[in-house]
Structures are given as structure tokens and as C-alpha cells.
Amino acid sequence: MHSLFKKVIVAVNGSEQSIHASMYSILMAKQLGCELKAVYVVDTATIRQLTLSKFLISDESNNYEKSLEEEGKKLLESVVQLSKQKGVKIQTELRKGAVWSELITCAEEYKADLIVLGGKEHDRVSVESVLKKDHISATNFGIVGYAGCNVLIVREKDIEKRFKIE
């Protein structure tokens, strides 16, 4: 039987939700035998906007970008360590640009079947939240709206327990 997913990308940003998404995707890769890639995007698009809006001066934006790049490398390494605990091979990639568009581009280049994202409890969709337009983060909304593959938003609260058990 062929696996439902062959190539999976998980978005990493350091939030608790992205760590949960990483754990979930590692367990999924182990069970389904799919290839896995963790991606961190240095949000240079927002840094550029903040600089143009004079919220950051040029030196600050350069320092901030370097800081985010270092943070991204550390976060990707922590996901590699998590995957080693489960005997799962994982690729990593650090990109720069607008987060949602870089993740979509990466998924296209990698020929991913699935993008895994972390989601917050308040990301749940209801009629009221849709009308208020606060039902999903802007980044996740962009990815869900424009991705050429399936997108999974992980909201499982007990994933840390499952990760330790499995």
C-alpha cells in the first residue's frame, strides 16, 4: 500500500504550536514512512516594512535579521534532535522572505504533498470569528489559501505526551 503522503514540510517558528506541529509531523513520518523537511523563514518582508515605516533603522534591521537567522538555525537543530529521538530522518531549510509565500514556494520546490502548521485554540473557525476575521493567523491563512498541496493545522494539546509514548 502506498503512503498517503510522500513528502511533508513542517513550518518552524519557535512557538509552542510549531514545536507541537514538529512533533506531530515526526510521528507521522515515522508511521507513514514519508520524507520530512523542517523549514524556518526569517521574515525579512516584515523587517523591510518596519524599516520603511521608520520603526527600525537600517542597523537595527540588519541586527534583527541576523538574530532571527541564528534563532532559526537553533530551532531547526532542535527539531533535528527531536526527529533523532524517533529515528526519523529530517531535512532542514532556512529561508528568507515573507513567511507564507516562502513556505508555499518551498513546498512547490520540494514537491510536498502536505504542509504541517501549528495552530492555536482560538484559530478555530466559527461564523462569528469569520465575520471578525480573527479565526486564523494571517500567515496560516495565506498558506491555507494559496498552497498547491494539502495543509494540516495541528491543535492537539496532548502531542507532547504522545511523542514521549510512541
Image (cartoon, grey):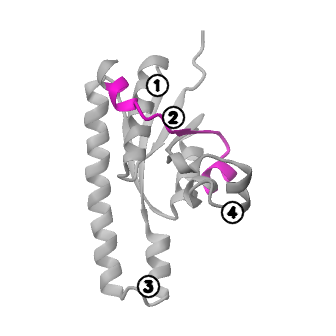
Secondary structure beneath dot 3 equals: helix
Among numbered discs 1 and 4, the one appearing first in the sequence: 1
* Magenta residue check for 41: no
Residue at 37%, 47% in the rendered image: 16
Viewer-nearest of labels 1 and 4?
Answer: 4
The numbered mark at residue 28 is 1
Q: Which mark is residue 8?
A: 2
59 with respect to 49 (left or right):
left
Q: Position of residue 90 (x, y in %)?
A: 37, 34
Region of the chain picked out in magenta, as a range: 142-163
Q: CA distance from mark 1 to mark 2?
A: 9 Å
What mark, if any, has residue 132 been given in the picture? 4
| SS at mark 1 in the image | helix
Q: Is residue 143 magenta?
A: yes
Q: State if disc 1 and disc 3 touch (CB < 8 Å).
A: no
Marks 2 & 3, CB-CB < 8 Å contact: no
Instruction: Give neighbour class at mark 4: few <14, some 14-19, many 20+ (Cα, 10 Å).
Output: few
- What SS does tag 4 mark? helix
- Inspect the image, locate mark 3, and give the three-letter code of the amino acid beneath it: Thr
- Mark 2 and mark 3: span between their CA atoms? 34 Å
Three-letter amino acid code at disc 1? Answer: Met
Proximity of marks 1 and 2: CB atoms separated by less than 8 Å:
yes
Q: Which mark is residue 51?
A: 3
Q: CA distance from mark 4 to mark 3?
A: 29 Å
Query: Which numbered disc, 4 or 3, marks the residue that appears first in the sequence?
Result: 3
Q: Residue at x 31, y 19 (%)?
A: 165
- Residue 48 picture location, percent across and down: 47, 78
Q: Along the polypeptide, which appears first: circle 1 or circle 2?
A: 2
